[in-house]
């Protein structure tokens, strides 16, 4: 764009092109905006510079999130998978896990631990991840398995199934704070991995959105419990529904609040021991 043409633009046109449209602002035009007597024009410049700073900060954040992946890529590992689960703490529904392998140049803006994102942003990112991933897989451990082998081991089962469901075998797997002894693939457990690894964070978003969609289906199949809203987590609404309606087939009968609703004796405390100290991450509420 010639500087003369740029100078003829109204403030509304400047905003439409360089703020709302996101076009890059040429250096000579930026200098002209600094001298522009119109307050609206100088505001356009401020917003463009703000966007640049945000883009730089986001780029740095994403590079930091790829430090585990970059180390593996530099060692010659072509396919690095991330895996995470959703639904360890709820009183109802399965544990859902997701695994994904992402392209090396993929930088999904805004990706983060799924618990730090609102539902709309999670859905947007999940769609983007599924569309751009080299491959991804979603798997689950059912309520009967949770009650039969305990919630911690059911989580491991779902994670392992998700990795094995990938259409290409990863050379290494990054896991959110778990060891997967039956996986048979080199893997690294990372405490708070969904906040420290882009690939794990992507898997956590896919897992969370998949489980939320499943709980909406279970809400239709078992009305009155509010599964579509609280996703089976131990909320006051859920406790009230348990007291009114009792438990339904998708409630976890090894969890104490459900047993109380059914009038069952407490499960021995050792059945709830999840893992050796330091191996289990925070709950994914």
Image (cartoon, grey):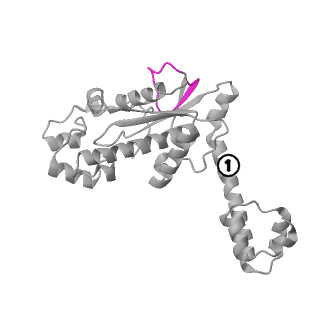
- Seen at 53% across and 34% down, the residue is 100
Is residue 163 left or right of 44 when viewed as pictured? left
56 is within the stretch colored magenta: no
Quadrant for the N terminus, please. bottom right
Q: Which residues are magenta?
A: 170-185
Classified by dominant secondary structure, the portion drawn in magenta counts as loop
* Above/below status of 274 relative to 182: below
| Circle 1 SS class | helix
Look at the image and say whether residue 182 sits in the magenta stretch: yes
Point out residue 210 in the picture as x, y percentages from the top left corner: 41, 42
Instruction: Return the x and y of residue 125 as percentages of the image width and height.
Output: 53, 48
The residue closer to the viewer here, 196 or 221, is 221
- Residue 42, picture quadrant: bottom right
Q: Which residue is mark 1?
A: 59
Q: Residue at x 21, y 38 (%)?
A: 249
What count of labels does the image hold? 1
Q: Position of residue 237 (x, y in %)?
A: 26, 55
x and y percentages locating residue 234 in the rendered image: 29, 48
At label 1, counting other C-alpha atoms closer than 10 Å, the crowd grade (few under 14, some 14-19, many 20 or more) is: some
Residue depicted at 59% across the width and 35% down the height:
102
Quadrant for residue 75, please give it: top right
Q: Residue at x 84, y 62 (%)?
A: 27
Residue 68 in sight here: yes
- Judge by depth and name the residue closer to the eye, 73 or 277: 73
Whether residue 197 appears in this view of the structure is: no
Front in this rendered view, residue 141 or 57: 141
């Amino acid at each position: 764009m010639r500087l003369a043409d740029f100078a003829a633009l109204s403030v509304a046109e400047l905003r439409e092109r360089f703020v709302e449209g996101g076009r890059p602002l040429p250096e000579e035009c930026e200098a002209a905006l600094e001298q522009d007597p119109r307050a609206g024009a100088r505001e356009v410049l401020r917003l463009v510079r703000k966007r640049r700073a945000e883009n730089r900060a986001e780029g740095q954040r994403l590079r930091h999130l790829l430090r585990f992946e970059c180390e593996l890529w530099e060692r010659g590992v072509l396919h690095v998978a991330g895996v995470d689960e959703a639904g360890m703490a709820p009183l109802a529904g399965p544990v859902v896990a997701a695994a994904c392998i992402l392209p090396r140049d993929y930088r999904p803006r805004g990706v983060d631990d799924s618990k730090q994102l609102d539902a709309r942003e999670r859905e947007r990112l999940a769609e983007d991840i599924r569309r751009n991933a080299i491959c991804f897989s979603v798997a689950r451990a059912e309520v009967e398995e949770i009650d039969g082998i305990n919630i911690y081991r059911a989580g491991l089962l779902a994670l392992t199934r998700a990795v094995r469901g990938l259409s290409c075998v990863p050379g290494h797997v990054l896991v959110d704070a778990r060891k997967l002894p039956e996986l048979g693939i080199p893997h690294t457990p990372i405490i708070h991995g969904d906040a420290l690894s882009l690939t794990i964070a992507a898997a956590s978003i896919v897992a969370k959105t998949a489980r939320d969609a499943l709980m909406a289906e279970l809400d239709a199949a078992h009305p009155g419990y509010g599964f579509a809203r609280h996703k089976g987590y131990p909320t006051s609404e859920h406790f009230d529904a348990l007291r009114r309606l009792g438990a339904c087939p998708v409630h976890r009968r090894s969890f104490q609040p459900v047993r109380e609703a059914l009038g069952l004796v407490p499960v021995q405390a050792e059945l709830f021991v999840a893992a050796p100290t330091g191996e289990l991450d925070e709950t994914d509420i």
